[in-house]
Amino acid sequence: MAAPLTRRLLALEAPILERYGISMWAYTVLSRLSEKEYRGQNVLAEDIGADKTRIIDVLDDLQDRGLISRDPDPADRRARLLAATAKGRRLREQVRRAIRREEEQLLSEVPSSDREAFVRALRTLTESAG
Amino acid sequence: MAAPLTRRLLALEAPILERYGISMWAYTVLSRLSEKEYRGQNVLAEDIGADKTRIIDVLDDLQDRGLISRDPDPADRRARLLAATAKGRRLREQVRRAIRREEEQLLSEVPSSDREAFVRALRTLTESAG
DNA sequence: TATTGTTATACTCTATAACTATA
DNA sequence: TATAGTTATAGAGTATAACAATA
């Protein structure tokens, strides 16, 4: 049942992401960078469960659009310091809110008495991770 | 949160399916055919959300292993009548039980007071489908 | 020599188009 | 001509291998 739910959520998010001209991976990256800075693209990739080669085009695009900064670390010029810009954080907030709205609407299908337990259980099963 | 949960469940199922020498699609097909017979591969494909061309190799394999029957419909020899054999249904039951066991174990992470509501909500969100 | 980021390549999954056989 | 199934082909997404820069 989890797979169909995921598909449904992805279908719900797709038009929102398209409206804001941002891909799913780009949104994932932007969200992480809005929460904290990263030192090293490989660390970021690892963190979001992606291959390091897969996020390069994503970072290129985000950087070109001024949504993130991406500078060599002075202490080790092999690595890149990654951070969301103010503009990037603003965009992320907009998208986040739009998605949140849709999710709330979807959640309204669930009887209110079950909602809290549902979200709590979902959090437990995803955060324990093992 | 749904996506990580789905990934986790898939990771949980993968070794079981491998142990029984059956792919995810094959298991999906076998499960459907264990529940009812189908008239037409395209109908089956549609039902499980797959392209009709994608299940052909799967059906070939299942048939070769004697897990399903696949005969031309005498009434319209273009179409195939699809059904799980007794052997196929047995295999499906084994796999199903193994997966069920793992799922129960995973669910045990959720406080028992939340479990019912969680499963109920999940069912609501996947069955309404709209 | 080892590591970060990058590029080039190959592989997997999926969708599309063309073909056959029936109707 | 239209449809079910099949095969061949092309495209996206992803992973692997080779490379350049830095340590």
Image (cartoon, coloured by chain):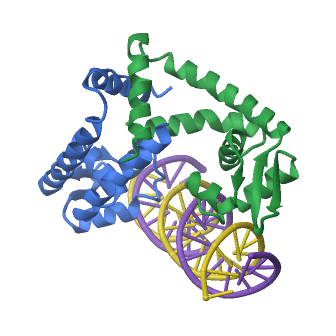
Chain colours: A blue, B green, C purple, D yellow
Q: Horizontal and vertical percent for residue A5? A: 42, 42
Residue A117 shows in the view? yes
Above or below — where is A58 with respect to B3? below
Observer-nearest residue: B95 or B105? Answer: B95
User: Residue B7, relative to residue A25: is it above or below?
Assistant: above
Tell me if B82 is positioned left or right of B6 in this view: right
Q: Is residue B98 above or below residue B24?
A: above
Q: Position of residue B59 (x, y in %)?
A: 76, 56
Between B63 and B95, which is closer to the camera in this rendering? B63
Q: Residue at x 51, y 25 (%)?
A: A130
Q: Quadrant of residue D19?
A: bottom right
The answer to whether residue A79 shows anywhere in this view is no
Please give left or right for residue B109 compared with residue A69 in the image.
right
- Residue at the spot x=39%, y=11% of the render? B113
Along the line of sight, the residue nearer the viewer: A113 or B35: B35
Image coords of residue C7 (percent x, y): 48, 73
The number of numbered discs placed on residues in the rendered structure image is 0
Image position of B122 (left or right of A18): right
Q: Position of residue A7 (x, y in %)?
A: 43, 48
Give whichever of B85, B65 is nearer the camera. B85
Horizontal side of residue B80 vs B49, given as left or right: right
* Residue drawn at 81 percent across, 63 percent down: B72
Residue at left 42%, top 26%?
B120
